Image (spheres, coloured by chain):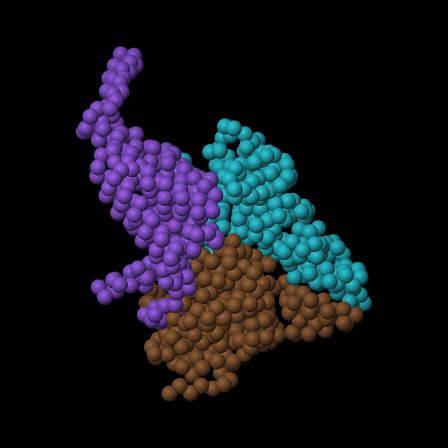
Chain colours: A brown, B cyan, C purple
């Protein structure tokens, strides 16, 4: 019997995974990785392309099954086929390209469609569609075609499609990669709001330090292993290390670091332009 | 000869119920050998503008003249124009098809009947420019490369046509930090060695600051602003209204200036900006030498 | 050019045609195919075509879609039909001779050709009229179906119509999902192909001339990326569907979002179309 703990959303223990298509002599995509995410937490999985972050994310909703080690979602082991449907309902996953997640040609149909496939009543479907569209702010676009939405709106639609299943955890895999700055901000604000106001656990996979800075905790992956782990302030304290991990340092954080090095009291958790400017003004 | 755009207006699907005005009375000049960034949010008309430069779209009214070729004129030599203007669309890696990288990059030159010994030369050069030396990568399948390498392989296919003008539509979309850095290095090499004119479509201001000397800001099909990156980044609040975000340090500068902190107006590089702040906050400890560096 | 294809262009509306159940429209479509091909057997039996044309025009009027919009989308097909008609008209022998063109003498220096005479025979003329009518009418019918029916409704209609065949192991729900996915993605893929043509043109591809070797490379330059892109898209879509839990539930009974019981409107429409076409076939 799965023993579910109220505090732990998901646990990966010593997970190793090698893609079946990879050359046999290559390093595995994940090598003995362990991860623990608490319920209600906002975690960023950070790393450059090929670091293993997406592979780890896919283990968390049973799209991939560990070859060694195990993944438990609220106590349910993903290696057990009977658990997978539950796991996928608990952990909703959104991907980088909104176009390849949206199936219907009318906004509300797309949210409703995967509920309809489950055979729920029209009344319940209606309720959940309304709820999901409200959560992502697309009520006014409900009768439009996804093609007439902006990139950010389309990605919000993809998120709504997943929210309609009322997951406890949202896994966002590079969801801003194809968006312009406006769309990026839209999605970033949405993820934060889902976390703060709806208490949803968020795991955001990203290669951008700017985005990871908004999380409660950052886990940096490199070569299929956890290289660093800590709060954003802790992680950004060692820029040389991040640079060595092929991560682009945001100029604000580099600036904060440079000023701190010169003796100005910029607090370590000043990670945005507003934070740094405020710290400077306070000191003056 | 530069690219000259005069009073360009363009309608999509003209003469149908779906007609849509994409550009309105845009005028600008892009000098030889310069790098011009065209920025704006999705739907601002930036892709529509640059597709005029090689005749994929032609003006509804107004004129676009590229190296003396009037793109809108009847009988304009579009084949010649397309040889001159290399167009790298978004995700150029999606054009890759050949079994080897060499053959893929050689596709364009061979299509236009370039003699094989010259093909070898231009392909080798294009691959070297993009940081994918022929000895190491020429015989590899383009599909075995990493994301950043595939992107540069796609661009090499455009460069093999030896264009005098290169149009890049969001060249770093979806690349990670390393991929970006490699691509910027390749584009700098291209400019240094061939003086290629570059038109860069982007919504990433960091990228614009990195590469461009001049910037056009488009908003709803109109030319909203024009200037150097330094000039534009001081107008953070104006750009924000158009959905554009200036780089982080420019944002810090904008906030500080709002509080009447006397910062030099046009600081763009990190060290330069840090020195300017230190000069205000720690005037006593500043050495005159460090200030002199700001220039 | 590719914009004129009939796929996946649903115009939401409130007309009688929009209110018809998708099943009714699909059944009528099938009926028109069978009927039009059956009617072609009798030479000069033109009444059937006129009746179908009349019904479809009535449909256009009832759908409140602007006729110009539909006409514009049919232009490409008109052109194709005319191009294929000319040789068919000239080179199909049989039946009475209706007209004789030529012979045409061409003199070029010392060379002297005689072309023709071209004979337009009755069978050829009927063949051309019959098949052109069938193609144009069916295309018009498919336009009406696509423009007035949400793709989700089409998919549900397909599922409901095929369900009785499930006992012979016809995968009705999978067909329905396939329909939905093609209606959504074919337009996107056409757009991508359009973009690819532009891109290869920009790097020197010339589609108007070239030797056999050049042309075969040209075909590869279009085909390989298209296939590669389609496969990648399919893979991503499958992953997204799987993580939305589709595979786990597809076996269950699906809730219909659009399709209800057939209404009076459906029965009347079916009766009118069946009767009027049958009468045209028998007595005209």
The answer to which of B21 and C81 lies nearer the viewer is C81
Residue displayed at 55% across by 53% down: B184
- Image: C230 above or below A127: above
Residue displayed at 39% across by 71% down: A118
Res B237 seen here: yes
The answer to which of A121 and B160 lies nearer the viewer is A121
Residue displayed at 58% across by 63% down: A186
In the picture, the quarter occupied by the N terminus of chain A is bottom left
The answer to which of A133 and B228 lies nearer the viewer is A133
The percent position of residue C260, horizontal first and vertical second, equals 39, 63
Task: Count the marks.
Answer: 0
Q: Residue furthest left?
A: C94
In the picture, the quarter occupied by the C terminus of chain A is bottom right
Residue displayed at 56% across by 60% down: A140
Q: Is residue B180 left or right of residue A2?
A: right
Res A222 seen here: no
The percent position of residue A249, horizontal first and vertical second, equals 59, 64
Q: Residue furthest top?
A: C110
The percent position of residue C204, horizontal first and vertical second, equals 43, 39
Choose top left, top right, bottom left or bottom right for residue C159.
bottom left
Q: Is residue C84 left or right of residue A278?
A: left
The percent position of residue A113, horizontal first and vertical second, equals 42, 65
């Amino acid at each position: 019997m799965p023993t579910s703990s109220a505090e732990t959303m998901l646990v990966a223990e010593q997970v190793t995974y090698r893609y079946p298509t990879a050359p046999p002599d290559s390093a595995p995509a994940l090598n003995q990785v362990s991860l623990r995410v608490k319920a209600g937490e906002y975690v960023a999985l950070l790393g450059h392309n090929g670091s293993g972050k997406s592979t780890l994310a896919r283990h968390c909703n049973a799209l991939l099954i560990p070859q060694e080690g195990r993944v438990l979602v609220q106590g349910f082991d993903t290696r057990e086929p009977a658990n997978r449907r539950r796991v996928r309902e608990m952990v909703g996953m959104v991907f980088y390209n909104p176009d390849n997640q949206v199936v219907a040609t009318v906004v509300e149909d797309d949210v409703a469609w995967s509920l309809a496939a489950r055979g729920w009543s029209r009344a319940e479907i209606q309720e959940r569609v309304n709820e999901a569209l409200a959560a992502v702010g697309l009520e006014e676009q409900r009768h439009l075609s996804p093609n007439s939405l902006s990139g950010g709106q389309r990605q919000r639609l993809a998120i709504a499609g997943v929210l309609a299943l009322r997951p406890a955890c949202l896994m966002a895999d590079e969801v801003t990669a194809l968006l312009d700055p406006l769309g990026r901000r839209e999605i970033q604000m949405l993820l934060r709001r889902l976390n703060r106001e709806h208490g949803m656990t968020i795991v955001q996979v990203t290669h951008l330090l700017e985005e990871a800075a908004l999380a409660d905790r950052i886990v940096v992956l490199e070569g299929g292993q956890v290289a660093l782990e800590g709060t954003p302030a802790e992680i950004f304290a060692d820029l040389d290390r991040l640079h060595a991990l092929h991560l682009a340092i945001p100029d604000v954080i580099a600036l904060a670091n440079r000023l701190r090095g010169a003796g100005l009291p910029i607090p370590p958790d000043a990670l945005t332009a507003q934070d740094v400017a405020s710290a400077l003004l306070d000191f003056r | 000869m530069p690219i000259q755009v005069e009073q360009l207006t363009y309608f999509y699907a003209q003469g149908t119920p779906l007609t849509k005005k994409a550009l309105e009375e845009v005028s600008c000049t892009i000098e030889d050998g310069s790098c011009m960034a065209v920025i704006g949010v999705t739907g601002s008309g930036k892709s529509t503008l640059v597709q005029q430069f090689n005749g994929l779209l032609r003006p509804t009214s107004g004129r676009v003249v590229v190296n003396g070729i009037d793109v809108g004129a009847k009988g304009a030599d579009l084949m010649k124009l397309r040889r001159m203007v290399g167009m790298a669309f978004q995700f150029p890696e999606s054009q890759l098809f050949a079994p080897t990288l060499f053959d893929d990059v050689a596709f364009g030159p061979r299509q236009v009947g370039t003699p094989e010994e010259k093909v070898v030369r231009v392909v080798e050069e294009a691959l070297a420019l993009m940081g994918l030396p022929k000895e190491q990568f020429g015989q590899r399948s383009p599909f075995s490369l990493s994301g950043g390498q595939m992107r540069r392989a796609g661009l090499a296919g455009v460069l093999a046509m030896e264009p005098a003008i290169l149009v890049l539509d969001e060249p770093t979309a979806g690349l990670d930090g390393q991929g970006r850095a490699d691509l910027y290095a390749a584009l700098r090499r291209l400019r240094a060695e061939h003086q290629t004119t570059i038109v860069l479509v982007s919504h990433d201001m960091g990228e614009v600051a990195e590469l461009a000397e001049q910037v056009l800001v488009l908003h709803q099909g109109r030319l909203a602003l024009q200037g150097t990156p330094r000039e534009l980044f001081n107008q953070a609040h104006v750009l924000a209204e158009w959905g554009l975000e200036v780089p982080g340090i420019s944002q810090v500068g904008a906030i500080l200036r709002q509080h009447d902190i006397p910062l030099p107006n046009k600081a763009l590089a990190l060290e330069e900006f840090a020195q300017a702040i230190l000069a205000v906050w720690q005037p006593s400890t500043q050495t005159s030498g460090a200030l002199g560096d700001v220039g | 050019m590719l914009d004129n294809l009939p796929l996946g262009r649903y115009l939401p509306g409130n007309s009688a045609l929009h209110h018809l159940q998708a099943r009714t429209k699909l059944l009528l479509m099938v009926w028109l195919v069978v009927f039009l091909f059956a009617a072609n057997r009798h030479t000069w039996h033109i009444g059937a075509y006129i009746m179908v044309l009349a019904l479809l025009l009535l449909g256009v009027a009832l759908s409140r879609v602007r006729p110009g919009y539909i006409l514009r989308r049919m232009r490409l097909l008109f052109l194709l039909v005319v191009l294929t008609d000319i040789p068919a008209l000239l080179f199909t022998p049989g039946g009475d001779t209706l007209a004789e063109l030529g012979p045409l003498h061409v003199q070029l220096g010392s060379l002297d050709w005689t072309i023709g005479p071209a004979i337009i025979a009755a069978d050829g003329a009927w063949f051309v009229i019959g098949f052109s009518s069938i193609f144009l009418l069916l295309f018009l019918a498919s336009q009406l179906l696509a423009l007035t029916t949400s793709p989700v409704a089409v998919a549900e209609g397909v599922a409901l119509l095929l369900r009785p065949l499930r006992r012979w192991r016809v995968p009705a729900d999978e067909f329905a999902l396939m329909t939905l996915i093609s209606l959504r993605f074919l337009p996107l893929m056409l757009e991508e192909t359009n973009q690819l043509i532009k891109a290869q043109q920009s790097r020197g591809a010339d589609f108007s001339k070239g030797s056999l070797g050049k042309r075969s490379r040209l075909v590869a330059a279009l085909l390989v990326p298209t296939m590669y892109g389609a496969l990648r898209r399919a893979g991503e879509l499958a992953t997204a569907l799987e993580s939305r839990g589709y595979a786990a539930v597809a076996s269950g009974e699906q809730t219909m979002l659009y399709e209800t019981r057939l209404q009076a409107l459906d029965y009347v429409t079916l009766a009118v179309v069946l009767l009027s076409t049958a009468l045209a076939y028998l007595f005209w």
